[in-house]
Amino acid sequence: MPLVINHNLMAMNASRNFTTAFDALAVSTARLSSGLRINSSADDAAGLAVSELMRAEIAALNQGVRNARDAQSLLQTADGALAVIDEKLIRMKELAEQSATGTYTSSQRTIMNTEFGLMRSEITRIANATKFNGVYLLNGNLSGAGTNGLKIHFGPTNSSAEDYYFISISDARGSALGIDAVSIASQSGAQGALVTLDAAITAKDNIRANIGSYINRLSNTVSQLSIQAENLQAAESRIRDADIALEMTDFVTNQIKSQAAIAMLAQANMLPQMALTLIGG
């Protein structure tokens, strides 16, 4: 290479190498400080697009887990109210059994029937009052099947086969259980009430069994969604997160290259002075 003074080609070359190494050092610094391999679309446009879609689906799945758990809480609220209704029905059965025997007078049966009626009214009151976040649970509003039930959405899209299903809770009011017209004011009425109350208890048990099945199904749904979100998060991490060990290696390499380029740039900038020595000579 000739010794010239118009162009310092060695300095230009050293400067270009320094810029390349320094830019790579800046990328390594950004990745190490953020923990992300992709900090902008320039880092990996395709990877960014894929990871953003994954992040959206992960967020939806995590919310789906919360939705399913909220549904479990709703069902547990209904089950708790039915447990109280169960107590009332058992007491009514006890009163009917007491009134059915011949050792009590009509006036005494009237007293029993008063409590019996209060228990029946309390069952209807509980069924009408039980709600979760404003949704009434036991008054028949959720007793429809399919789209008339309560839609529990937990998947990231809107496929009926994959992302949601409906739950229904039957009416638990006294009229639905068939006990509204029951009286134990007479011995014969009390004897008939025993059969009616058995049917009411069975109907109530069927509602609770149905609720328990939904709770168990939702537990499985939560487990499946959690596993799916975890695996998707792992896949997203492999695309977007930085390998710290690898990035630290690149950082040190680029740091050394930058320092070497700076040192050579300083040396190259001194080369034109050699020409002045020749001219002076």
Image (cartoon, grey):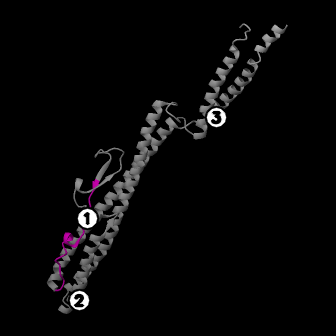
Determine crowd level at label 3: few under 14, some 14-19, many 20+ residues with C-alpha closer than 10 A.
some
User: How far from the left and from the top, in percent, is residue 138?
Assistant: 27, 66
Gap between marks 3 and 1, in whole Å?
63 Å
* Callout in the foreground (2, 1): 2
Give the mark nearest the N terminus, 3 or 2. 2
Would you call the spot at circle 1 few (<14 residues within 10 Å), some (14-19), or many (20 or more)? few
Q: Is residue 29 above or below residue 190?
A: above
Report the span colored magenta: 166-185
Quickly name the residue at label 2. 111
Specify the quadrant of the image occupied by residue 161. Answer: top left
Q: Nearer the viewer, mark 3 or mark 2?
A: 3
Residue at position x 67%, y 21% from top? 15
Q: Are marks 3 and 2 in contact (CB under 8 Å)?
A: no
Q: Residue at x 24, y 78 (%)?
A: 121
In the image, residue 180 lies in the stretch drawn in magenta: yes
Residue annotated with mark 3: 248
Answer with left or right where residue 182 lies relative to residue 30: left
Q: Does label 2 or label 1 sit earlier along the sequence?
A: 2
The quadrant of the image that shows the N terminus is top right
Give the camera-side residue of 202 and 60. Answer: 60
Q: Is 3 positioned to the left or the right of 69 in the image? A: right
Callout 2: SS: helix
Identify the residue shown where x is 68% and y is 25%: 257
**Is label 3 or label 1 in front?**
3
User: Which comes before the other along the chain, label 3 or label 1?
Assistant: 1
Marks 3/2: CA–CA distance: 86 Å
Secondary structure beneath label 1: helix
Q: Which disc number belongs to residue 118?
A: none
Residue 105, can we see it?
no
Please, what is the three-letter code of the amino acid marked with disc 2? Ile
Label 1 belongs to which residue?
206
